[in-house]
Amino acid sequence: MISMFQTNHGKNPSIAQNLFTLIETVIVSYFFYKTFSWRPARLLTAIAAVAFALFWLFMFIPAGTTAALVVCVTIESILIISLSIYYMYEQVLRSDILMVYVQPRFWVVIGFLFYAAGTFFLFLFVDSLDIAAQKEYHDIINSISLTLKSICLSVAMLMRNDNYVIKKL
C-alpha cells in the first residue's frame, strides 16, 4: 500500500518494498518457528531468519533507497517454499493427527506456499524484462498468487480452532 501511494505521488517505492520484504520474512519465519515441533528445525529456522536479515542488510546498504532488492525477494521465496515443504513433511510424519487439512495452520502454510511458488520465477526474472513486460506479468501473476493466498488465509480464519489430535488410550 505504501509503495503504491509513493508511486502515485512520484516517489521511489523501493524503500517501502525493501522494508516490507525484511519484515515479512521475519514474521513468516517466526510463524514457522512456533509451528515446528522438532527443536533442530526450529533452530535452523531462527538461523535462516537471522542470516536473511544480515544478507538483506548487506544488500540494502549499497543499494539504499534507489533500487528494489529483487534478489532478497527471491531468497525469501526460496526460504518460504523450503519451510512450507518441511512443514508438510513434519505433518506427514506425525501419526497423532488424523486430518491435517482441518487445522487452520495448514491453510496458512498452503497460502504462503502458493504465493511464494507462484511469484518465485516472476521475481527471479523480473530484471531481464522490459518495463512494459514487467508490469504486465507482475499484474497477472501477482494477482493470481495473491488471490490464491487470500482464499487460503480466509479458509484458515473461518475454521474452528479445534484440536484434531488423536487421543491415546
Image: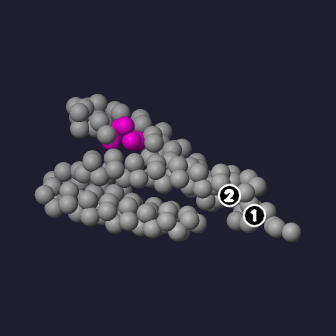
Which residue is at 50% across, 62% downward?
Answer: 41
Residue at the extreme front: 40
Residue type pointed to by label 1: Val
Q: Quadrant of the C terminus?
A: bottom right
Asked whether residue 105 is drawn in magenta, I would say no
Q: Residue furthest right?
A: 169
Instruction: Tell me the SS state at disc 2.
Output: loop
Q: Tell me the residue that label 2 is attached to.
A: 94
| Mark 1 element type | loop
Which residue matches tag 1?
Answer: 165
Q: Earlier in the sequence, mark 1 or mark 2?
A: 2
Disc 1 from disc 2: Cα separation: 10 Å
**Residue drawn at point x = 75 percent, y = 63 percent:** 165
Q: Is residue 26 visible?
A: no
64 left or right, relative to 26 = left
Please rate how many residues cluster around mark 2, counting C-alpha atoms within 10 Å: few if below 14, some from 14 to 19, many from 20.
Answer: few
